[in-house]
Amino acid sequence: MKVTTIHSQSLFDIANQVHGNVDQAFAFALANNISVTDEIPAGTVLKVPTDVELQNKDISNYFKNKHLATHVVLPTHGELSPVNEGIGYMAIEIDFIVQ
């Protein structure tokens, strides 16, 4: 069995969708010779591992019956960039005043 990815899907999304359990992302990674943290381009065809032990059929059937696919869209354009303030960014007598 194979599954085709959509935009912004990770192996965790695919594992949850197909097997109802994100733990199976590691089995997907091994079956497809990729890392669980790899960005997967939309349209990539992945092999579905068949030697899985843990499955939540209720979750996988929900996605299958409703024709749904999970994916996470992360913010872009620096929305997650750190704010330059706080103890780690302060210098004594410049930003951090000792009283």
Image (cartoon, helix red, strand yellow):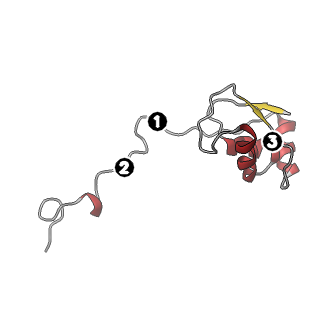
Q: Position of residue 78 (x, y in %)?
A: 40, 39
Q: Nearer the viewer, residue 53 or 72?
A: 53
**Where does the N terminus fall, quadrant-wise?**
top right
Q: Is residue 51 shown above or below 5?
A: below
Question: Element under label 3?
Answer: helix
Rounded to the nearest angstrom, the CA distance separating label 2 from label 3 is: 35 Å
Find disc 3 in the rendering and name its residue.
18
Question: Element under label 2?
Answer: loop
Residue type at mark 3 is Val
Find disc 1 in the rendering and name its residue.
76
Q: Is residue 39 shown above or below 36?
A: above
Q: Is residue 42 shown above or below 32?
A: above
Closer to the chain start, of discs 2 and 1, is 1
Find disc 2 in the rendering and name its residue.
82
Q: Position of residue 40 (x, y in %)?
A: 63, 33
Q: Nearer the viewer, residue 24 or 58?
A: 24
